[in-house]
Image: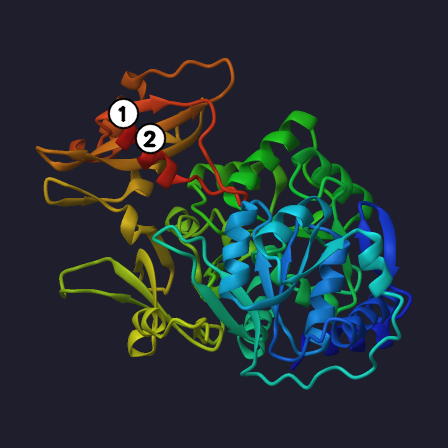
């Protein structure tokens, strides 16, 4: 099923319903949204010779035009290549070349740089007169008959272990993700709104489908990204708002709500994922803002669809094991299967393996990597975790992040959870440092609240009270702000580079 058909159907059912909003300002209703997408689709075919199966990249921050470009691309059966807007133009150019992209939608400020790096690729600036001119073409009435097996989303991984790989997601993969969302994550109604605070190039953008299907509102903040105060104020004005945030964003949202003396009354649902949510942070979030939070776990190779922890489970404090469940990422989403790969019967944890209809087709032009990642019909996630008797999945760490010290495995998240219990600690990142004696030593990078002083002795005592002595950090580095990517994940690779240089 082609997503553009969903837009077309909603435009017929709710033509006057507000569709695209910049802040509180309605830019287009559903009829206008569909007509603009169909007109751009015509221009892509007639002017730029884009055909079904061709790759079209979007290298842009969040805008309403981003959504118009998405649906125009799908309207003609082409493939979207979403590129992280924070990448350097050289990095974006590598993806553009590797994906065989034939046309790029981007922000005006990127055009000159991309022209230099991609001289043979057509480039159109979003929010420019050139883009607006595309919408003046005669709308293309027929939506391409996309099949479930057809690739429609070519997402490039972050490339932390080498060059990024292109994850091929089919219409069927994303259809399964959507079905699981309605079953396991949240209900969407015609009166709801999705607010794009996290990048549309990632999971936040994939959640557009649920709102198109129900003729609901799509809101792009005037900032074009995440601003906690803006999100709270805007949500209060437009009501029934759902949004997807990384855990670090949730913490900043809660801190801002507390400082403003509000409880997020305009927010319906905050879905969080994409990194570790520490137990103390989500407890604080629910205590202040109530049962508005849902957790999901997914990867680019199985987008947003591996497991979910419902709002009822996130808010529950009555179950005898509520803390353990809150520290988990929930249970497998509908249609998905999760298991732990163990090398011995005595082993409790191991690599998380996933199978089901939301798992990617494979990697673009990389049969070797596809075979490795999908060995035996299971997606090998590279995450280490455990499954309890009730099916709750708990993540420990990425396999590459596990610290091996003196032959013992130490999971950084376990140490981070303890250190974050200190009231003045904002953020923690625990990594391994090379050691001739032990192989690796545990070290912690700590960010504390402004104006506060936290001693190593205080953090040591916290650790010694709750975890084995060998897991305690050998060294603490106090930093004002930990390095992050644009999605809010702490960049442990940067911290490792810094350690290597000292």
Colouring: rainbow
The 10 Å Cα crowd at callout 1, few under 14, some 14 to 19, many 20 or more, is few
**Frontmost residue, 185 versus 5:** 5
**Frontmost residue, 387 versus 15:** 15
Write down the residue under mark 2: 498
Viewer can see residue 101: yes
Image quarter (top left, top right, bottom left or bottom right) of the N terminus = bottom right
Can you tell which quarter of the image residue 103 is in? bottom right
Q: Position of residue 157 (x, y in %)?
A: 45, 58
- Residue at 74% over, 53% down: 125
Query: What mark, if any, has residue 502 been given in the picture?
Result: 1
Looking at the image, residue 294 lies above or below residue 14:
above
- Residue at 55% over, 60% down: 96
The answer to whether mark 1 and mark 2 are in CB contact below 8 A is: yes
**Frontmost residue, 265 versus 493:** 493
- Judge from the rendering whether residue 109 lies leftward or rightward of residue 326; answer left or right: right
Q: Position of residue 249 (x, y in %)?
A: 56, 40
- Residue at 38% over, 50% down: 160
**Frontmost residue, 325 versus 453:** 453
- Judge from the rendering whether residue 441 lies leftward or rightward of residue 136; answer left or right: left
Q: Position of residue 37 (x, y in %)?
A: 79, 69
The 10 Å Cα crowd at callout 2, few under 14, some 14 to 19, many 20 or more, is few
Q: Secondary structure at mark 2?
A: helix
Looking at the image, residue 2 lies above or below residue 352:
below
Viewer can see residue 423: no
Label 1 – label 2 distance at C-alpha? 7 Å
Query: What mark, if any, has residue 452 been given in the picture?
Result: none
């Amino acid at each position: 099923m082609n997503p553009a058909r969903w837009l077309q159907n909603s435009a017929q059912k709710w033509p006057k319903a507000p569709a695209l909003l910049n802040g509180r300002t309605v830019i287009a209703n559903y009829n206008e949204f569909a007509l603009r997408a169909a007109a751009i689709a015509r221009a892509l075919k007639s002017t730029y010779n884009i055909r079904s199966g061709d790759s079209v990249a979007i290298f842009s921050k969040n805008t309403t035009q981003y959504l118009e470009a998405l649906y125009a691309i799908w309207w003609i059966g082409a493939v979207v290549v979403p590129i992280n807007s924070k990448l350097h133009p050289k990095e974006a150019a590598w993806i553009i070349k590797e994906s065989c992209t034939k046309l790029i939608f981007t922000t005006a400020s990127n055009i000159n740089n991309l022209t230099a790096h991609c001289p043979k690729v057509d480039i159109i600036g979003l929010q420019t007169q050139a883009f607006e001119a595309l919408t003046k073409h005669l709308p293309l009435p027929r939506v391409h008959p996309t099949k479930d097996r057809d690739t429609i989303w070519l997402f490039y991984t972050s490339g932390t272990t080498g060059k990024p790989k292109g994850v091929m997601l089919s219409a069927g993969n994303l259809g399964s993700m959507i079905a699981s969302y309605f079953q396991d994550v949240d209900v969407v109604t015609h009166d709801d709104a999705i607010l794009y605070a996290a990048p549309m190039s990632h999971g936040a953008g994939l959640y557009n489908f649920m709102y198109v299907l129900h003729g609901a509102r799509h809101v792009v903040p005037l900032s074009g990204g995440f601003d906690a105060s803006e999100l709270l104020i805007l949500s209060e004005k437009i009501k029934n708002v759902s949004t997807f945030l990384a855990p670090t964003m949730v913490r900043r949202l809660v801190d801002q709500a507390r400082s403003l003396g509000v409880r997020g009354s305009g927010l319906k649902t905050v879905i969080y994922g994409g990194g570790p949510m520490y137990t103390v942070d989500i407890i604080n979030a629910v205590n202040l803002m109530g049962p508005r939070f849902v957790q999901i776990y997914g990867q680019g190779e199985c987008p947003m669809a591996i497991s979910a922890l419902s709002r009822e489970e996130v808010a529950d404090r009555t179950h005898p094991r509520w803390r353990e469940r809150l520290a988990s990422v929930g249970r497998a989403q509908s249609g998905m299967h999760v298991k732990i790969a163990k090398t011995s019967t005595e082993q409790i944890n191991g690599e998380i393996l996933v199978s089901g209809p939301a798992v990617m087709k494979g990697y673009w032009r990389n049969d070797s990597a596809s075979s490795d990642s999908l060995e035996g019909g299971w997606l090998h996630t590279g995450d280490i975790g455990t499954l309890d008797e009730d099916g709750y999945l708990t993540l420990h760490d990425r396999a590459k992040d596990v610290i091996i010290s003196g032959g013992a495995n130490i999971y950084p998240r376990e140490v981070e959870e303890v250190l974050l219990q200190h009231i003045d600690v904002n953020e923690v990142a625990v990594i391994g440092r090379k050691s001739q004696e032990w192989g690796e030593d545990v070290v912690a990078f700590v960010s504390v609240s402004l104006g506060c002083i936290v001693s190593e002795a205080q953090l040591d005592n916290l650790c010694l009270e709750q975890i084995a002595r060998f897991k305690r950090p050998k060294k603490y580095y106090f930093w004002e702000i930990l390095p992050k990517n644009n999605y809010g994940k702490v960049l442990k690779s940067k911290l490792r580079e810094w350690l290597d240089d000292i």
